[in-house]
Image (spheres, grey):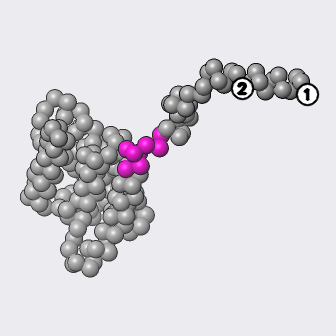
C-alpha cells in the first residue's frame, strides 16, 4: 500500500512540475486529423457542388431547351475551383468530371471524355505556370486556348481513326471566344479582389 501511495505521489509531483502542454499535443496530432482543415472542407464541398451541377446539366438543358454544354460547364467548374479552392483540386476535377458526366449521361463519348480530361488538366497546368510570369487575364486566356489547341489536335487524330462521324469543332468558335473572354475577366477580377487590401 505504501508503495502504491508513493508511486501516486511521484506521478502527481511530476505532473505538477511539468504540466501537459495541450497546444503541443494539438500541433503534434496525426496528419490524418490535421488534414481536416477549412481549405480541405471547402474543396470537398466544392467538388460535391461541381459533381451535382454536372449531374443536373442534362436535366436543366432539357427543361430550358438550351444546350448548356455549349457554355462549357465543366470548364466553368474547373475555373471556379482554380480561383476558390486549393491548387490540387482543379486537377482532381479536371480528370474526373468528364468521366462522371459520361457515366451518368453517356455524354460526351468515352474517348471524348478522355480528351476533355487532358484538355482541362492542361489548362490548369498552363495557367498556374504562366501566372507566375504574366498578367492573370492573359494567363487564363492563353491557357484556355493552348489547351483547346491540344484538344483539337488530339481530336483530329481521333476523328481520322476511331471517330469518323464526329465533327472536329462542335461549338462555334465565336462562342468559344466569347466564353473565353468572360472566363478571363472573371479570373482577373477575382484574383484582383483577393490581392486588394481589406
As for residue 80 lying within the magenta part, the answer is no
**Spot occupied by residue 180 in the image (x, y as percentages of width and height):** 14, 52
Q: Identify the secondary structure beneath mark 2.
A: helix
Instruction: Provide the major secondary structure of the magenta segment.
Output: helix
Whether 79 is drawn above or below 71: the answer is above
Residue at left offset 32%, top offset 75%: 59
Of mark 1 and mark 2, the one earlier in the sequence is 1
The mark found on residue 134 in the picture is none
As for residue 38 lying within the magenta part, the answer is yes
Residue 18 showing in the rendered view: yes
Density class for disc 2 (Cα within 10 Å; few <14, some 14-19, many ≥20) is few
Residue at mark 1 to residue at mark 2: CA–CA distance: 17 Å
Residue at left offset 71%, top offset 26%: 12
**Spot occupied by residue 106 in the image (x, y as percentages of width and height):** 38, 67
On the rendered structure, is 11 left or right of 196?
A: right
Numbered range of the magenta stretch: 35-42
Whether 174 is drawn above or below 188: the answer is below
- Residue at which label 2 appears: 12
Whether 4 is drawn above or below 49: the answer is above
Question: Between residues 138 and 189, which one lies in front from this camera angle?
Answer: 189
Q: Identify the secondary structure beneath mark 1.
A: loop
Quarter occupied by the C terminus: top left
**Spot occupied by residue 194 in the image (x, y as percentages of width and height):** 19, 42
Amino acid at each position: 500500500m505504501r508503495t502504491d501511495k508513493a508511486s501516486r505521489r511521484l506521478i502527481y509531483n511530476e505532473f505538477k512540475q511539468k504540466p501537459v502542454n495541450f497546444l503541443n499535443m494539438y500541433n503534434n496530432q496525426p496528419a490524418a486529423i490535421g488534414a481536416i482543415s477549412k481549405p480541405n472542407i471547402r474543396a470537398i464541398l466544392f467538388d460535391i457542388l461541381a459533381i451535382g451541377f454536372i449531374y443536373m446539366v442534362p436535366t436543366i438543358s432539357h427543361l430550358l431547351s438550351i444546350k448548356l454544354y455549349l457554355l462549357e460547364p465543366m470548364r466553368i467548374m474547373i475555373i471556379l475551383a482554380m480561383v476558390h479552392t486549393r491548387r490540387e483540386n482543379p486537377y482532381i476535377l479536371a480528370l474526373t468530371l468528364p468521366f462522371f458526366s459520361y457515366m451518368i449521361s453517356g455524354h460526351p463519348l468515352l474517348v471524348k471524355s478522355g480528351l476533355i480530361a487532358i484538355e482541362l488538366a492542361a489548362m490548369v497546368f498552363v495557367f498556374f505556370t504562366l501566372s507566375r510570369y504574366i498578367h492573370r487575364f492573359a494567363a487564363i486566356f492563353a491557357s484556355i486556348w493552348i489547351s483547346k489547341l491540344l484538344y483539337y489536335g488530339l481530336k483530329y487524330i481521333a476523328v481520322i481513326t476511331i471517330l469518323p462521324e464526329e465533327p472536329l469543332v462542335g461549338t462555334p468558335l465565336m462562342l468559344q471566344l466569347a466564353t473565353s473572354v468572360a472566363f478571363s475577366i472573371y479570373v482577373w477580377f477575382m484574383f484582383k479582389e483577393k490581392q486588394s487590401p481589406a
